[in-house]
Image (cartoon, coloured by chain):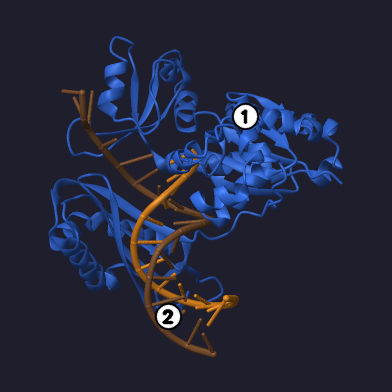
Chain colours: A blue, B orange, C brown
Amino acid sequence: MNRIIGHIDLDYFFAQVEEVENPVIKERPVLVCVFSGRTEDSGVVSTANYRARELGVRSGMPIVLAKKKLEGKEPVLIPLERGKYDAMSERVMQIVADEVDVLQQTGIDEAFFDITKKTNGDFAISRSFADRIKKSILESEHLTCSIGLGRSKAVAKLASDSSKPAGLLVIEPESTESFLNPLPVTKLYGVGPKAAQALEELKIRTVGELKASQFQDLEKKLGRSLAIYLQSAASGTDDEAVLPTREMPSQLSRIITLKRNTRDPVDALAQLGNAVSDLEERLTKQNVTYRTISAIAILTDLSTRTKSKTFETPMRTVSGAESSLLALFEELGSSVEKEFRRVGVRVSDLESNENQSSLSEFLTPA
DNA sequence: GTATGCTTTCGGC
DNA sequence: TTACGGCCGAAAGCATAC
């Protein structure tokens, strides 16, 4: 039977949530921004609505640059409020989950799904299925989204991307090749600036050229696993399964921009104070322990360095590892030629505490 | 050589 | 002219054990 895989992507998600909350801004360029707090407008644009995109604004663009592009266009700048988008995301994903065989969320605003069983592998039925999901999201949350359907994850994702915004594109198996071949390789998941450069050196610019390329050349430039993935994706034959979203995250991190650059570990840790307690709170809320802690530093040239330490036994608190964290920042500071611009802390090797009684339950019985 | 586990970097949104 | 966040998961890199 045909597999029928879908990819759903909420259009310009953060900015669209803001438009839903306050529709009068819809006609204007809307920028959801991360203000770093270092100077008046330091920070980047996280998401922009299409009105702003038409005027040249992009995700990741410095706020001051975006403002320059929007002079006289009455832009609306809104600080990013993560919790709000998390809540909306959860409601939308539940709507989708209720309609499909399996849902695999891959980001706050996107997910893969499998509807092979629901549709009996019939692509003719699949379109109305996707339509129903779109209508349901629009009616209950007033959000538009884009959906792509195809025979593999890679095809579904490329299809949703091609249909943006508010689109629905169904790529039937017979038309997979003609859909994929002319696409630029840079549209493929896994092809960022580095891989794009490597492919350019091999004169591979389209997905069709990628499919027809010599595997050995690809492997040499990109490594075995990426080469294997890319050639299967390019031929529309990647057979990766849609796996149910994992219950637990595999890592948690908090990262901040420093008010002033430093390489002093004590200073870095002091400025990180709130972030550490924040992370601790998230650990408690998720009810997980960790075994590995990492110090993260982003240098003045925006390159990233990390140092990590793994403990024998699971840790419940971040503050309990403060001396280790300090030591990691000391190592970073002395191994590095430039100052820190941003610093962060990450915990990984997470383990659920579910079904494990905590000491406090014994000490303070209900 | 292969499996395994930890550390670091990369890519995506 | 430059300008510059905060997360996540996966892969690469490296060391060790067999």
* Extreme residue toward the top, this view: A72
Structural distance between the alpha carbons of marks 1 and 2: 48 Å
Residue A80's spot in the image, x, y percent? 37, 36
Query: Relative to A250, does residue A121 appear above or below in the rendering?
Result: above
* Residue found at x 28% / y 72%: A321
Q: Quadrant of residue A184?
A: top right
Q: Nearer the viewer, residue A291 or A299?
A: A299
The local secondary structure at tag 2 comes to helix
Left/right placement of residue A105 relative to residue A241 reads: left
* Residue found at x 35% / y 20%: A76
Q: Which amino acid does label 2 sit on?
A: Leu
Q: Which amino acid does label 1 sit on?
A: Ser
Q: Which of A167 and A30 is in front in this view?
A: A167
Residue A205's spot in the image, x, y percent? 55, 32
Q: Quadrant of residue B9?
A: bottom left
Query: Relative to A172, does residue A104 appear above or below in the rendering?
Result: below
Residue A211's spot in the image, x, y percent? 66, 40
Q: Quadrant of residue A276?
A: bottom left
Chain for numbered disc 2: A
* Residue found at x 54% / y 70%: A354
Chain for numbered disc 1: A
Q: Is residue A218 visible?
A: yes
Residue picked out by circle 2: A359
Residue picked out by circle 1: A146
Left/right placement of residue A1 relative to residue A355 reads: right
Q: Earlier in the sequence, mark 1 or mark 2?
A: 1
Q: Is residue A316 visible?
A: no
